[in-house]
Amino acid sequence: MHVHELCPFCAIVLGRAPAEIVRELGSALAIVPLDPVVDGHLLVIPKHHVADFADDPYITGITAQCAAELARDLGLVSANLITSKGRAATQSVFHLHQHLLPRAENDGLALPWYSGRRRAAS
């Protein structure tokens, strides 16, 4: 397991920092973030330190597989799986993490983009 000494998620993986671990997923952990944006919001973090989704595509794929299996096991009907790369893309912890966000109609969570089609003027 490659660990970055100053990484807060590596500290969680090693049991050196507190976290609400929801499930161990083989090569990843599902934890509750400090400030969940919707009920059921989870972070899926690989046990192996990689900075972001482009750092190690293999680890990224395995982590996404873990998140997909978790979403299936939880019976999520609607959800977002979101990750970021770099500060400009809102990444604040530089250890790959995928946000698994259960969604419901009118849940109040606004994403920073729409489907790509322009909304009709109101």
Image (spheres, rainbow, N blue to C red):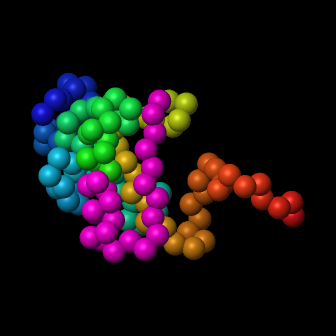
Q: How many marks?
A: 0
Viewer-proximal residue, 57 or 24?
57
Q: Position of residue 51 (x, y in %)?
A: 33, 30
Give the position of the N terminus as an image quadrant.
top left
Q: In the displayed structure, would residue 34 be above or below residue 10?
A: below
What residue occupies the far top of the structure in this picture? 5
Res 2 visible = yes
Q: Position of residue 119 (x, y in %)?
A: 78, 59
Task: Check if residue 77 falls in the magenta segment.
Answer: yes
Q: Position of residue 7 (x, y in %)?
A: 27, 30
Query: Which residue is pictured at 18% across the width and 55% down the height?
Result: 25
Q: In the displayed structure, would residue 60 be above or below residue 110?
A: above
Query: Which residue is pictured at 52% across the width and 72% down the height?
Result: 104
Res 36 visible = no
Query: Which residue is pictured at 38% across the width and 65% down the height?
Result: 40
Q: Position of residue 80 (x, y in %)?
A: 46, 59
Give the position of the C terminus as an image quadrant.
bottom right
Query: Which residue is pictured at 33% across the width and 65% down the height?
Result: 71
Q: In the displayed structure, would residue 117 be above or below residue 74?
A: above
Q: Which residues are magenta?
A: 65-86
